[in-house]
Image (spheres, coloured by chain):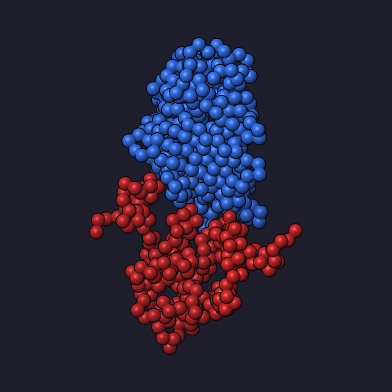
Amino acid sequence: MILHTLRLRSFRAHAESEFDLAPSVNLLYGPNGAGKTNVLEAVHYLCLTKSFTASRDRYAVRTDAPYFEVEGRVGQVRKEPMTVKLAYVPGEGKSVFVNGAELDRLADLVGLLPVVVFSPEDHDLTAGGPSERRRFVNNILSQARSVYMETLMKYRRARRQRNEVLRSYKKRSAPPPDALLAPWTEKLVGLGSRIVHRRQQFLQAFADDLEEAYRRIDAVAERPTIEYDTIADLAPDATPDDIEDAFRAALDRKQGQERDRGTTLAGPQRDELIFRLDDLEVRRYGSQGQHRTFAMALKLAQYFYLQRRNDTEPLLLLDDAFGKLDAERTGVFLDLLRSDAVGQSLVTATRRGPFEPALDAEPASHRALQVQPGDGAAVVAPDPEYAGGDATASNGVASASGGPDATAPTSRS
Amino acid sequence: MQYTSESVEALVEQFTKLPTIGKKTARRLANYVLKMPQEEVETIASALRSVKEDVQRCSTCYVVADQDPCPICSSDKRDASTICVVEESSDLIAIEQTNEYRGVYHVLGGVISPLDGVGPDDLRVHELAARIDPSFEDTAADAAPAPETMPDGEADDDADPSENGQVQEGETAAPVDEVILAVNPNVEGDTTAYYITQLLEPFDVRVTRIARGLPIGGDLEYADEATLSRALEGRGHVD
């Protein structure tokens, strides 16, 4: 699956940007704040109907613009290319169009264009709170199976309803009557157990992907593992029925506490993943380097998993991912981007320099785009030296890039 | 600064109270009304008024109707031993249009949704139980003081045989064999269905739920995963 063209209208720093993309590495370079990450965000909107940053939709609308629009032309294997468009109007919400026809539900878009993002925030995956890790699993499973996301949304709804019953009776200082609470508990258990079951199955399959990914990034022979800490100790082959029983029992044990606190205290919303390198728990005892490598391996493993599961190559978005990497790991990653293991990627960087070897290798399939803060709006322009198929002089200039500001095209055409 | 007339603005504001109507659509509607002939506007206004003034609810099934009991409850062609439970009167109309269902109905008036402040007591679930067993008393364990329940005797009095065809709770009414839950297949609908199933458990009545799954004429290949898995869950015997 390849994104051929991308158009952004009134999206953050971009007033109207339209450009072609190459089938392999696409480097977006330019000074900080020029609007490079905005391009990756726009692509992410087309894939998952939202940004990969925690920012709200309305902040993505360019100042004083009434709406934003993102459109991409997507080439598929053995199928006609399709046009995917997402529009957002503050107050009215988002709508998605595939080949001009509006989708009934935004959720129907998810999984169509699988995507994996590498960003500086990946650090939180291994170092942050449990919710970061649940979000990671939810992201993968939602892209891999539409039914998972539906179950997840229903579960959240059931939990909010159940919490409301608990909360309102806590306020009245009375225990919630069983006739009112039990139906919500039942719904919660049914939906929640399906989520736990899916996560459990997923993590078993994902273990191999993680090992493979770790091996590619780091030569050190540490073995990465993930332990799934959920509602109760479950056998690896626990059936949905077993999980339901365990979930019900857990809620039963917490009954008194739930009454006192007025909220649901057991379920997959409290799941945790424990990352280990051999016996070392990464979150507590991992070195900076181990954190970085582990987070990177998780994302790469996500790529492998989605690729296998969806039978297509996901888009790879790398937001300043090389900023904190040492030269050795950068090299490994660049090799990976160029290899057949990865399909199309969009990479942001302040400098073109480190990527020139990658861009030079096969000019037809790689491209560099310069993102500049123009007169009030971002300007995206193909770098004439690395403009995909019609690249001109591609050799002999690699050493020309000096400091971080050596981005202006000045005398090079 | 006010550039338009205040009455137009007031109309726009009233229109936005309607579901699915945003500010833009409301403005378009208001402008349209402005251009309509006076008589047509009067017709709309009186239709709006009479919908509140003339329409009532059937005291048995609670459907919106012009008469009480409603035509369905008072028809002797309908099978009063089967009750189809729906959320709103509009759902009843949808089922009636199939021409497949010959039983009677019960309109709940919504679904259980604590977030919207709707509990079982705000719905007509106990009225449903009372239709199945007239001796049913509101024993919901709600901490709120239980409303006065109808004494048994009164229900018997109501079942006056002279009221021809009217299906009323009482010893003489046809016993209810089956309750079909036709609530929407979402979290709140599922939970309401569960609540009703539990409530009716003590009674000698079959509680069923309408099937969910593939639409007629839908190709398996094109069904989304969620629909397919639901259809698999609710699979049945080959007819």
Label count reads 0
Q: Nearer the viewer, residue A140 or A377?
A: A377
- Image coords of residue B82 (percent x, y): 37, 70
- Residue at 51% across / 37% down in the picture? A7
- Residue at 54% across / 19% down in the picture? A413
- Residue at 60% across / 65% down in the picture? B31
- Identify whether A127 is placed above or below B93: above
Quadrant, the N terminus of chain A: top left
Q: Nearer the viewer, residue A74 or B216?
A: A74
- Image coords of residue A370 (percent x, y): 56, 26
The reply to whether residue A96 is in sight is: yes
Please, which residue is most extreme toward the right here?
B1
Q: Nearer the viewer, residue B160 or A98?
A: A98
- Image coords of residue A51 (percent x, y): 55, 37
The reply to whether residue A290 is in sight is: no
- Identify whether A31 is placed above or below B192: above
Chain letter, colour blue: A
Q: Colour of chain B?
A: red
- Image coords of residue A412 (percent x, y): 56, 18
Locate residue A285 relative to residue A309 in the image: left or right.
right
- Residue at 35% across / 56% down in the picture? B215
Q: Nearer the viewer, residue A411 or B175?
A: A411
